[in-house]
Image (spheres, rainbow, N blue to C red):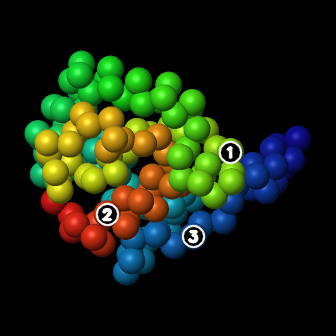
Amino acid sequence: MQLNKRLNSNMNSKPLRPCNKPGCPNLTNGGYCEQHKTTKADNNRYYDKYQRNKKHDRFYHSASWIKCRDYIKIRDNGLCQHCINEKRITVGVLVDHIIPLSADWNKRLDEDNLQLLCTSCHNKKTNEDIQKYGRK
């Protein structure tokens, strides 16, 4: 009985593998060893403190943005506008600024500058915006 428990516990555990941090020699059961394991909250805290644009952050929490965002979702029928142009039906989840806030702050609530996108299209467009306007 004791032997069966030991065999079952050894058979259920995954083999150790190298830590995902480049150059780290430690072995772990998960992606990163204890030394390099960070939580999403830690990453967000760093981003909030050193990289997030405070002016944009205040805007995205304002009542005027929330009302405008909700209107755009209704106007676009809850569908991703890029996917519709490609003859695909995809639920839109993010209201996007066609011309980013960092390029033209005055268009932040301009309905003609807003569109509803799915996550995939939003990520593609964000990368294109970084190429076109730079990261600000």
Q: Residue 12's x, y, as percent?
A: 76, 52
Is disc 3 placed on a helix, strand or loop? Answer: strand
Q: Nearer the viewer, residue 52 or 61?
A: 61
Residue type, numbered disc 1: Ile
Q: Quadrant of residue 110?
A: top left
Q: Nearer the viewer, residue 39 or 75?
A: 75
Can see residue 66?
A: yes
Q: Mark 1 or mark 3: which is in front? A: 1
Residue on which disc 2 sits: 129
Q: Mark 3 or mark 2: which is in front? A: 2
Residue type, numbered disc 3: Arg
From mark 2 to mark 1, how far is it between C-alphas? 24 Å
Q: Residue 37's x, y, as percent?
A: 38, 55
Task: Specify the quadrant that holds the N terminus.
Answer: top right
- Contact (Cβ within 8 Å) of mark 3 with mark 2: no
**Residue 20 shown left or right of residue 44 in the figure:** right
Classed neighbour count for the residue bearing mark 1: other residues with Cα under 10 Å, few (<14), some (14–19), many (≥20) = few
Residue found 40% across the figure and 39% down from its top: 95
Q: Nearer the viewer, residue 67 or 45?
A: 67
Is disc 1 placed on a helix, strand or loop? Answer: loop
Classed neighbour count for the residue bearing mark 2: other residues with Cα under 10 Å, few (<14), some (14–19), many (≥20) = some
Residue 89 numbered mark, or none: 1
Instruction: Please tell me which of labels 1 and 3 falls first in the chain.
Output: 3
Can see residue 48?
A: no
Q: How many marks?
A: 3
Residue type, numbered disc 2: Asp
Residue on which disc 3 sits: 17
**Residue 67 shown left or right of residue 72 in the figure:** left
Q: Is residue 43 above or below residue 133?
A: above
Instruction: Please tell me which of labels 3 and 2 falls first in the chain.
Output: 3
- Contact (Cβ within 8 Å) of mark 2 with mark 1: no
Is disc 2 placed on a helix, strand or loop? Answer: helix
